[in-house]
Every structure is written in structure tokens, then in C-alpha cells.
Amino acid sequence: MSFLKAIIFFLLVIYAQHGAQGEIPMRTMHLINLANNKGPYIGVVIPNLFELNPLLQSPSFTASDFTIDFSGRRFRFGTIAGKKVILVMTGLGMVNAGITTQLLLSLFRIEGVVHYGIAGNADPSLHIGDVAIPQYWGHLGLLNWQRDGHGPDDELALEAAGDYSREYGNLRFADYTSNISDNSAPDNNLNRIWYQAEEVFPIDGTPEQRQHVFWVPVDPHYFNLAKKLQSLNLEGCVNATTCLSTTPKVATVLRGASASIYVDNAAYRNFIYEQFKLSPVEMESAGVALICHQQRVPYITLRALSDLAGGGSAQSNEADTFLPVAATNSVIAVVEFIKLLSVAKAAV
């Protein structure tokens, strides 16, 4: 072997052992291949540790000794009701949720995604502890902030090019001005914002040719299965002395929404409920929905309500108190849903 060939061979060995930045190391790729030979799996996507831990401790989850750590995420393997699952925690916010979901779908053989966790509530017909399962998810964090002095009939910047629209929202900040000292109509230099549809690039579409979606539907089969959870018994107490005043229930609802914003404001909660007829509001589910929609993978989200976003009731702003109940109820619901998936597949 010539000296040059020896150097090239040495560099290839080093590359195979360590990988270039952004590449999958050889050992990790070997583990991924081993996992995929045993697939497919249901991907269970969880926002944070306080929502993950109750599932890890659930007698319905059987953990294997097999885990794969890659790109800052830990993929945990196991079964729920005999159904092979991969659990992965995203972390807070839309970016983390989207990145983690894409990694899950790119690395592993996934037949469907189930996302669960807690959420704030915008729907006056629901209560703390309830589990809400929306049929559609929207992202309320993609905005066009209109120039001061322009009104609702004025075209937005780049609207003619198809980048933005005035189809959704129209949140006028002046409508929420308080302590007016005279009878003049209030104004506000912040003007108004318009909510925007997401640009998506589905795997069955043409690359670089965008499509738009505002309300992303969950999988219809999954949603119909979820309706069977409405008689499920849920937890109502934190301890022997701290209980909810209503009996928690599972409810299939029309819409939920996400943004990388923690909503603790009653005026905004009322606005988005009136505008969009939302139930759960939180920070990750639309990210999961948008990735699954583009990858054409069935998915659903189950969110247990931990607080009334912005308060306004006898149980207002009690996320810290009732978070354990909500987290537990979300796990109860997701376990039962995966049991339904297992039964439904066995019947096919």
C-alpha cells in the first residue's frame, strides 16, 4: 500500500469511527438499524420530564434496556399493551418539537405518532384535569405585524406575492387599551397583527414549491378511536385534601393551537377563543402536527388541561397545584389510546 493510500485509509477509519459534524456515527447507525429491523413503532412524543416520568413509572409501559442517544435526544424503546413504542422528549417550544419529531421520523420506522402532555385551557366548557383531543391544530406564532396607520382593508407587505394574508386573526391592540381619560377613540402604535398559515413542503409534493396550511387535521382513524376514551376514568385529586371541584373527563374538541408563548392573559385567551374556537393552548403540538403532516405520518395529540390560561375562575392560575393531576391524566389517556390502537390493528 502506497503512503498516500495509507493516509486515505487512516482518514476513512477515523471518519467511520467519529463521523463528520452532523453525520450519524457508525455505532449509532448500527443501533438504529438494529432497532428498525424490529419495527415499526408508534412514536410517543413528550414535551418535558414532568410529563415523561409518569409514563416511565406506569405499569402499562414495559421499558427495554435499549436506548439510543443522538443529537441531544434520547430515544427510549419499550411496549405499551404489546405495542412497540419509542418515547422521546422534545423540550419546550415549537422549534424543539419540530426538530425532535423530524429526527424520530427520519431515523426510525414509525407507523404513527402520539403526542401528549399538559396544556392551558381557552374553552369555557372544559375544566382543569380534563383531557382535550383536538381534531385540528394551528400555529399561532407566525404573524404579520401591520404598519402603524394601516387599517384592516390595507394590503399587507408582500401580500400580493402570496407570502401573507388577512384571512386569520386581526388582533388590534387598541381594542385592549384601558384607563381612557376622554371620549376619543383609543389608538395604539402597535396597530394590529394577522395570523399566518404555515408554508409546508410535503414529501409527496414538489421540492421548493410551497403549500400553505393553517389548520392541520389529525389522522381521522386515530381521532375516531380517541372518541372511545370519553368514558375513561381520570384522576381528580393531588392528595387527600386537594381535589378538583369537577370530575375530569376526556373530550374530543374541534381545535387546539400552539406557539412558543406561555399564555397567562385572560384578554388574549378570550380573543383566541372567540376568533378560533380553541380548547387547549400550549407550546409544542402544532410543531409535531406540521412535521407529521408534511411527512404523511398519522398522528394525534392528547392534552390534559392544567389551568385556565390567564385565570378568571375559582381555580385560576393553579397550574403549579394541579400540574401533577394533569400530567397523570394525560398519561392515563395516552396509555388507553395506544391500547385501542393495538386492538384495532389486531382486528385488521
Image: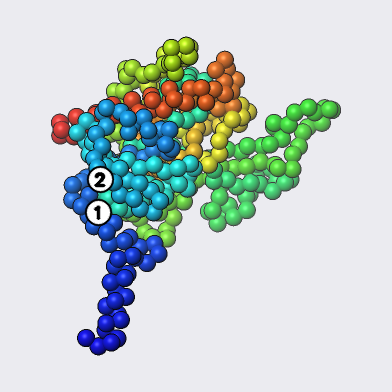
Q: Is residue 101 above or below residue 266?
A: below
Mark 1, secondary structure of its residue: helix
Q: How many numbered marks does the figure carry?
A: 2
How far across and how far down the image is residue 315, in percent? 55, 17
Give residue 246's quadrant in the image: top left
Mark 2, secondary structure of its residue: strand
Q: Amino acid at mark 2?
A: Phe
Residue found 57% across the figure and 20% down from its top: 316
Residue that badge 2 annotates: 66
How far across and how far down the image is residue 193, in percent? 62, 42
Q: Quadrant of the C terminus?
A: top left
The answer to whether 120 appears left or right of 147 in the picture is: left
Work out whether mark 2 precedes mark 1 in sequence or the reverse, and give the earlier one.
1
| Viewer can see residue 214 | no
Give residue 82's quadrant in the image: top left
Residue at the outermost bottom position: 2
Along the line of sight, which residue is nearer the eye, 315 or 27? 27
Residue 123 tag number? none
- Asked whether disc 2 touches disc 1, contact meaning CB atoms under 8 Å apart, the reply is yes
The answer to whether 273 appears left or right of 345 in the picture is: right
Q: Amino acid at mark 1?
A: Leu
How far across and how far down the image is residue 151, in percent? 69, 43
Residue that badge 1 annotates: 31
- Cα–Cα span, label 2 and label 1: 9 Å
How far across and how far down the image is residue 236, in percent? 41, 16
Q: Is residue 83 above or below residue 332?
A: below
